[in-house]
Image (cartoon, rainbow, N blue to C red):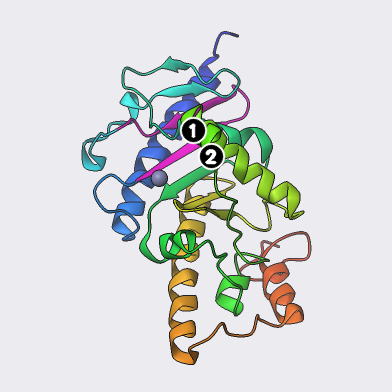
Amino acid sequence: MKTRTQADERRLEALRGAVVQANRDIVTAGLVLLTWGNVSAIDRETGLVAIKPSGVAYDALEPSQLPLVSLETGEVVDGSLKPSSDTATHLAIYRAFHSAGAVVHTHSHAAVCFAQCHMPIPCLGTTHADHFLTDIPVTRSLKQAEITSKYELNTGLVIVETFREQSLDPAHTPGVLVDQHGPFAWGTDTAKAVENAIVLEACARMALDCRSLTGAAPDPADRTLVEKHFFRKHGPKAYYGQTSS
Ligand SMILES: [Zn+2]
């Protein structure tokens, strides 16, 4: 492993701080009961991932305690605490989705309801389309052998498989439901990943309520409207918000 420079250390310190803040933010946002959630972020230059330690109370987290894990090997290279048990899932997402700078996993209520019913979160309107260009997909269920051996890694691999098989771009669909489990969301940094996790849960709640209002699955949102909303905020032709001149 290459020696870390002072610049590397400064970036990693900031990364650990951002990950601690994001782990608190998902609690404040109402996405987490008990310790059902974890956030990580990656420094692509060193190939190191800062992730929440396993089973540690969110308000007691100190940035210097956060484990730094090698993207390549999964080994802890820094920090005294054991990393989240979901670490291998986060690493599989970073290895395959190069646009992901941070990953959020929660068991937020409405999203878990969809995951437990094997249903994607349908794109029904512009709230969803402002952040996700497509339905938020649900993976297939894991096979017995995938559960009994390397479960967390296989959870990540089935996410990657879902995106490959459905030809989805993880930068355009920054979240997924793992079947019978719950949501993972990601973004270019911790703030974006947390925002996407919040929107994912809000859209799941809205979709549930739409279904209960009509008693059936509502029609999907108009594709022209969806693409208009997504691409005015994302990509080279984005124009939403304040632009610097
Ligand atoms: Zn979980």
Number of the label disc, if any, that sits on residue 178: none
Is residue 154 toward the left or the right of residue 243 in the image?
left
Magenta stretch holds residue 40: yes
Q: Determine the main secondary structure of the stretch shown in magenta.
A: strand
Residue 89 image offset from top left, x and y in percent: 52, 36
SS for callout 1: helix
| Above or below: residue 100 compared with residue 68 | below
Residue in the image at 48% along x and 89% along y: 215
Image-quadrant location for residue 154: top right
Instruction: Check the picture and name the quadrant holding the C terminus.
Output: bottom right
Query: Can see residue 90?
Result: no
Q: In the image as oriented, which residue stretches furthest toward the front? A: 144
Q: Name the residue tied to disc 2.
A: 155
Residue in the image at 46% along x and 37% along y: 40
Mark 1 → mark 2, Cα distance in angstroms = 6 Å
Range of the magenta residues?
37-54
Q: Name the residue tied to disc 1.
A: 151
User: Which quarter of the frame holds ligand 1?
Assistant: top left
Query: Can see residue 166?
Result: yes
Q: What amino acid type is highlighted by mark number 2?
A: Thr
Label count reads 2
Q: Are marks 1 and 2 in contact (CB under 8 Å)?
A: yes
Magenta stretch holds residue 205: no
Question: Is ligand 1 less than 8 Å from the beta carbon at label 1?
Answer: no
Residue 88 image offset from top left, x and y in percent: 51, 30
Judging depth in this view, the residue of 213 and 145 nearest the camera is 145
